[in-house]
Amino acid sequence: MPGEMLFARAHARTSAAALEQNLSLLARRAEVPLLLPVKANAYGHGLEAISRVAARHPDVWGLAVATPQEAGAVAALELGKPVVLLTPPRPAELEELADLGVRLPVASLEEAEALPAHARAHLKVDTGMNRLGARPEDAVRVGQRLHERGVLEGAYTHFATADEPDLSFAHEQFRRFQGVLQELPPLLAHASNGGGILSLGALPGMRLARPGLASYGFAPPHLRGVLPLTPVMTLEAEVTYVHTVRAGESVSYGGLWHAPQDTVLATVGLGYADGYPRNATGKAFVTVAGERRPMVGRICMDQCLVDVSGLNVQVGDVVRFWGPQDITVSDVAAWADTIEYEVLTGLGTRIERQTDR
Ligand SMILES: *Cc1c(COP(=O)(O)O)cnc(C)c1O
């Protein structure tokens, strides 16, 4: 078969054990089972592998996705766990999603009426994020209508500031959500994202929680001491070329970097098309042969360059861009002036996802 001997240059290895431990820690702190967000290819980790590991975990109630296509992809795995869609589907998609058993968000009376009779709904309440959902004063009527139609399973809201040091607005949002729930029959209520679990802990009346980034091992700086979370992914790529540049020569696009002395460079098969941020140029480090070494010159589309002077590095050796120790996604995000979410979800399709225990 053509391609049989052609292998990926870059690998994202995910640790099932790290994910499982993070999920246990988060569920224990939230005191409820988890609705694990696996949107955006499971935050770049690989939708199928992460969904399979999560579905076997006793603390995972279900899997949450952002798009109807993601919902279809998870439903097709037939994992026996509920799939919850977090953004509004098109009217034409309702029937198929309901047939697949996907739980649907509902935020208006119109949507409540349009739902197929065999659908299951999660009432979306906008308590201050102002992105999606029914305002609290309208949400009760929508929930009551869903209940009359026999399709109401859950209700949820989303915090805008639960990962920030000042929690006053998160508390206000929760108070508004509780006001809505008081007027409805008991249902599967959920509010906290990862930041909410870490900062607020268990919330009264909640039946589920939705930690995304925290499940994959990351917390905002001021909440890092709350739980011993472990980064789930290790990103590696192979050295494709090793050569020496002479003192004073420039390297890569724009000739930004000049070798201060004769320097041995490793060219590595990972670039910004794979999601490694070009903005980290001039700041980034990697781990190679067990040592922390700087990337030099502009990060390219498919490649980058590392100063490996004094190390025994050969073509085919593995360079680690991030992992649970040493250099983490948080470091890379800081170098690139962005957040872990954007770095992880930006990982490209050329990177082969693998799962370790
Ligand atoms: C993405 C998302 C989450 C997860 O957020 P984290 O900050 O990654 O924990 C939870 N709820 C909703 C509605 C989301 O869109």
Image (cartoon, rainbow, N blue to C red):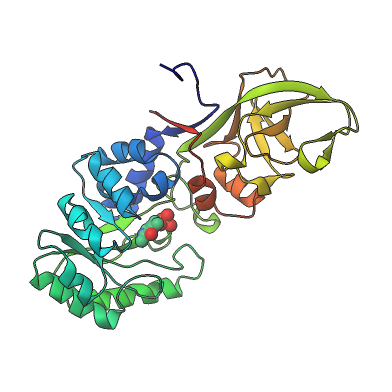
| Left or right side of 350 for 334 | right
Which residue is at a point 40% across and 52% down the rendered structure image? 212
Which residue is at a point 69% across and 22% down the rendered structure image? 241
Q: Position of residue 315 (x, y in %)?
A: 65, 18
The quadrant the C terminus occupies is top left
Q: Quadrant of residue 84?
A: bottom left
Rendered view: 96 above or below 286 = below
- Is residue 32 visible to us here? no
| Near-viewer residue (297 or 332) | 297
Q: Position of residue 191 (x, y in %)?
A: 32, 64
- Is residue 7 visible to us here? yes
Q: Quadrant of residue 46?
A: top left
Q: Position of residue 67 (x, y in %)?
A: 34, 54
Rendered view: 265 above or below 73 = above
Rendered view: 26 above or below 147 = above
Which residue is at a point 25% across and 51% down the rendered structure image? 33
Quadrant position of ligand 1? bottom left
Q: Position of residue 253 (x, y in %)?
A: 76, 40
